[in-house]
Image (cartoon, rainbow, N blue to C red):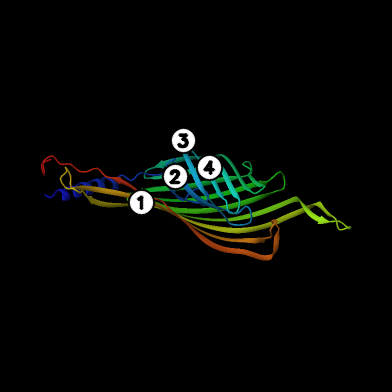
């Protein structure tokens, strides 16, 4: 029998084993935690990441990385810590977030139900001289998923609910972001896909003072303190899609005078797509509502990772072709 055919038989046998041992996954899905998208991990282990925030009244796209540090499972629970470093230099917005989630799961037959909640969180969004600090005592976040393992494939569905409350500077006001969502996905040996829909509202109430140049009654330039205020609300929708695809390709060796004719190369490619729709107020240069017209629109972001390759073991048979 030709050597390449024997290699093909070995690869098929290996594939059958993989397809019958797809694991249940009780951990967080691919679609992320905050309506963001991610790609592959870099040399340092951090993951390339993009997210859209609405606390300023504008849909600000932030890019950067997330480092993930899984904890040791204890019984049927596990804690995972996420560190976000995101910014947008063009508009002067940066985000610093440290988030620890605790996931508890219950396995019943071929099903796993999991509940994930925030254990610890710290978050600051900086826009110029304005700081939005997350209030952990007023904020909540929870997600529930169920995973069902069928032959060769696992299916997952989940729901998400949350509220984030940010204080602005020192007592100037607050921003409240409330959201809910759902997700579905599947996983098998050839890849995995998860799609997530998040629907939210954002509202801000703020009063602050600024120093402005003006003129007095005699026409002299003076600086005076002016009080500004902002009271607005808006809505947003995020549609997230994450996918991981595995391709298998036979690669022949050159030259052929070696102990095996070729082997199979597995290529893994990750992609994240985020579609955002928003209905927000129109704000002037100092952040106050300007008229009754709304700022409405939508856009799409895409992150595609660099393909990762892995050579698969070469089947070896002692009784054929001199082996």
Percent x, y of residue 237: 55, 58
Q: Earlier in the sequence, mark 3 or mark 4?
A: 3
Residue at image coords 28%, 51%: 248
| Cα–Cα gap, marks 3 and 2 | 19 Å
Secondary structure beneath label 3: loop
| Cα–Cα gap, marks 4 and 2 | 14 Å
Taking the image as shown, residue 69 lies to the left or right of residue 152, namely right
Q: Which residue is mark 1?
A: 191
Mark 2 is surrounded, within 10 Å at the Cα level, by few (under 14), some (14 to 19) or many (20 or more) other residues, namely: some
Percent x, y of residue 21: 31, 44
Q: Earlier in the sequence, mark 3 or mark 2?
A: 3
Residue extending farthest to the bottom is 293
Q: Which mark is residue 117?
A: 4
Q: Earlier in the sequence, mark 3 or mark 1?
A: 3
| Cα–Cα gap, marks 4 and 1 | 27 Å
Q: Is residue 313 visible?
A: yes
Q: Is 244 situated above or below 69?
A: below
Q: Is 292 situated above or below 25?
A: below
Percent x, y of residue 71: 46, 35
Q: Do labels 4 and 1 touch, CB within 8 Å?
A: no
Query: Given this view, does label 3 or label 2 mark the residue nearer the observer?
Result: 3
Residue extending farthest to the front is 220
Q: Which residue is mark 3?
A: 71
Residue at image coords 44%, 43%: 27
Q: Which mark is residue 113?
A: 2
Q: Which corner quadrant holds the C terminus?
A: top left
Query: Given this view, does label 4 or label 2 mark the residue nearer the observer?
Result: 4
Q: Which mark is residue 114?
A: none
| Cα–Cα gap, marks 1 and 2 | 22 Å
């Amino acid at each position: 029998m030709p050597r390449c055919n024997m290699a093909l038989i070995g690869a098929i046998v290996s594939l059958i084993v993989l397809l019958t041992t797809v694991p249940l996954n009780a951990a967080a899905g691919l679609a992320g935690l905050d309506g963001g998208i991610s790609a592959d991990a870099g040399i340092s282990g951090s993951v390339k990441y993009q997210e859209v925030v609405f606390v300023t009244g504008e849909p600000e796209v932030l890019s950067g990385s997330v480092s993930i540090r899984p904890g040791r499972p204890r019984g049927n629970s596990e804690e995972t810590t996420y560190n976000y470093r995101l910014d947008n230099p063009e508009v002067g917005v940066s985000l610093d977030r440290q988030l620890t989630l605790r996931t508890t799961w219950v396995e019943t037959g071929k099903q796993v139900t999991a509940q994930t909640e925030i254990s610890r969180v710290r978050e600051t969004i900086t826009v110029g001289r304005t700081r939005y600090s997350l209030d952990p005592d007023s904020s909540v976040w929870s997600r529930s998923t169920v995973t069902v393992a069928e032959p060769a494939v696992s299916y997952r569905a989940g729901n998400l609910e949350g509220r984030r409350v940010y204080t602005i500077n020192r007592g100037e006001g607050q921003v409240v972001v409330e959201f809910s969502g759902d997700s579905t996905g599947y996983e098998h040996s050839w890849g995995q896909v998860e799609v997530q829909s998040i629907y939210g509202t954002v509202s801000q109430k703020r009063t602050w003072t600024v120093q402005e140049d003006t003129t007095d009654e005699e026409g002299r330039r003076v600086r005076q303190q002016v009080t500004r205020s902002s009271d607005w609300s808006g809505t947003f929708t995020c549609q997230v899609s994450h996918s991981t695809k595995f391709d298998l390709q036979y690669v022949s060796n050159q030259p052929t005078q070696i102990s095996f004719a070729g082997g199979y190369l597995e290529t893994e490619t990750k992609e994240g797509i985020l579609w955002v729709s928003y209905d927000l107020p129109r704000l002037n240069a100092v952040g106050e509502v300007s008229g009754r017209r709304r700022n409405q629109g939508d856009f799409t972001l895409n992150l595609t990772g660099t393909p990762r390759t892995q050579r698969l073991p070469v089947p070896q048979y002692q009784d054929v072709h001199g082996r």
